[in-house]
Amino acid sequence: QVQLVESGGGLVQTGGSLRLSCAASGRTFTRHSMGWFRQAPGKEREFVADITGSAAMPSYADSVKGRFIISGDNFKNTVYLQMNSLKPEDTAVYYCRAVAAGTGIDYWGQGTQVTVSS
């Protein structure tokens, strides 16, 4: 079994920064992609950013482009999300997701709360 453990959430003022981390443990796997989704109260879970393939090509939702930076370590199956210029609308539970290469099985973390105060 694969476990994803997120850390780094918290409370920050508008304009502040936070860095989220996600590390995979348990059974080893080769990832196809690894990244972040978020879910605000009363809203559906939405894509934030991910990295794909051995080259770790990044993709971002339009709402976070230019403010968030995703990075990762292929060998350690870790991924990070540097969040800058945070806005109240960024408030959500942030979930780490990994998709295994070959099988396409996806794994999810338990989520970490990010709250941006105005």
Image (cartoon, helix red, strand yellow):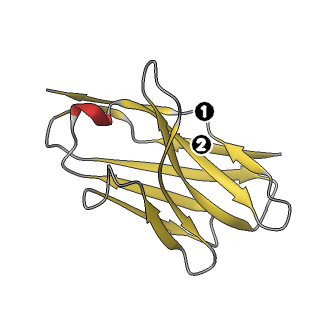
Give the residue at x 59% y 69%: 52
Closest to the observer: 96 or 104? 104
The answer to whether mark 2 and mark 1 are in CB contact below 8 A is: yes
Position above or below: 85 against 14: below
Judged left or right of residue 27, residue 69 is left
Judged left or right of residue 4, residue 65 is left
The residue at which mark 2 appears reads as 5
Judged left or right of residue 114, residue 52 is right
* Numbered disc 2: secondary structure: strand
The residue at which mark 1 appears reads as 110
Residue 95: x and y, percent? Answer: 54, 39
Q: Specify the amino acid type for callout 2.
A: Val
Q: CA distance from mark 2 to mark 1?
A: 7 Å
Give the residue at x 60% y 32%: 110
How many C-alpha atoms fall within 10 Å of the one at disc 2: few (<14), some, or many (≥20)?
some
Q: Specify the amino acid type for callout 1.
A: Gln
Position above or below: 57 against 15: below
Query: Residue lying farthest bottom?
Result: 55
Residue 44: x and y, percent? Answer: 52, 29
Position above or below: 32 against 84: below
Residue 20: x and y, percent? Answer: 41, 47
* Numbered disc 1: secondary structure: loop
For the C terminus, which image quadrant?
top left
Give the residue at x 54% y 74%: 56
Closest to the observer: 27 or 86? 86
